[in-house]
Image (tube, helix red, strand yellow):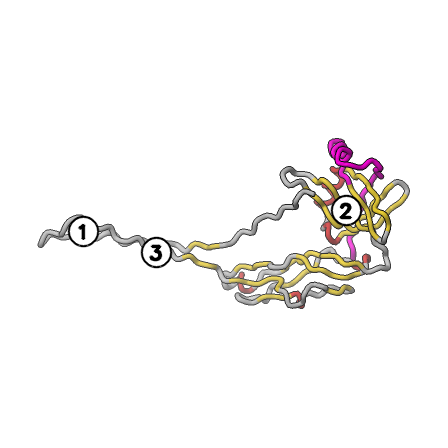
Amino acid sequence: MAQIANLAAESRTVLGKGEMRRLRRAGRTPAVIYGHGREPATLSVSSFELSRLLESIEPASTIVDVKVGDATYRTLIREVQRHALRPGIVHVDFYEIKAGEKITLEVPVHLVGIPDGVRNQGGTLDQVLRMVEIEVLPTEIPERVELDTTALSIGKSLPVSALVIPNARILTDAGLTVCTVVAPRIEEVAAPAAAAVEGAPVEGEAVAEAPAAEPAEPELIRKRKPAEEEPEK
């Protein structure tokens, strides 16, 4: 069942960059609501309330009832623009939806369970796909889609076709990989060469043997994914 949140907004008629800077200084975030062939309506919302809302919901799949005066608009958040260098939201777009009309949106994929290849074989679970696109009625929007990974062994993967989303049609390519279990990568460290002995050994003189180097411990190599950053518009 769809998750529903509420947010109060105010209409704004003065446009331009100067007005938007003034709003942000006053603790408000410029916004727009559009959809169904209507003229976009310019709004502003409390920056504090918006940030608190986004921290508590999954923005891509949560219905937001935006209250403007006496009217309430049922919407989805289509875009959140963040500053490229400083923390804070500079703009947010709301898309108005209707109860009986199917919509297209992305929902997050949540992996559950500990794969056999991780638990018993030392592998690593790699989630390749984190969002899938679906077509669904607003009242049937899932907060997220769960995928059980318990049976996965090393080298095995699960495709989009393994996802089950009631009352929705999955639009993402069914053959794409959602997750896979990979074997740990080990970097071999060569043993240091014995130090050269200066000069030729004297006949009958015992030559001290260099102590054997202790075997190096394997180093586990993992790739880090760089954080994504929204460009400022």
For the residues marked 3 and 2, what is the alpha-carbon distance in whole angstroms?
A: 56 Å
Please provide the residue range marked out in magenta: 1-30
| Left or right of 174 on screen, residue 71 | right
Measure how far apart labels 2 and 1 are at the Cα level: 77 Å
**Residue 221 forms part of the magenta stretch:** no
Determine crowd level at label 2: few under 14, some 14-19, many 20+ residues with C-alpha closer than 10 A: many
Give residue 208's mark.
1
State the residue position of label 3: 190
The residues bearing labels 1 and 3 have C-alpha atoms spaced at a distance of: 23 Å
Residue 71 at x, y percent in the picture: 89, 44
Q: Secondary structure at mark 2?
A: strand
Task: Give left or right: position of 225 versus 8.
Answer: left
Quick check: marks 3 and 2 in contact, CB under 8 Å?
A: no
Residue 125, position as x, y percentages in the image: 56, 59
Residue 50 lies, with reference to residue 144, above or below; the image says: above
Q: Which residue is mark 2?
A: 93
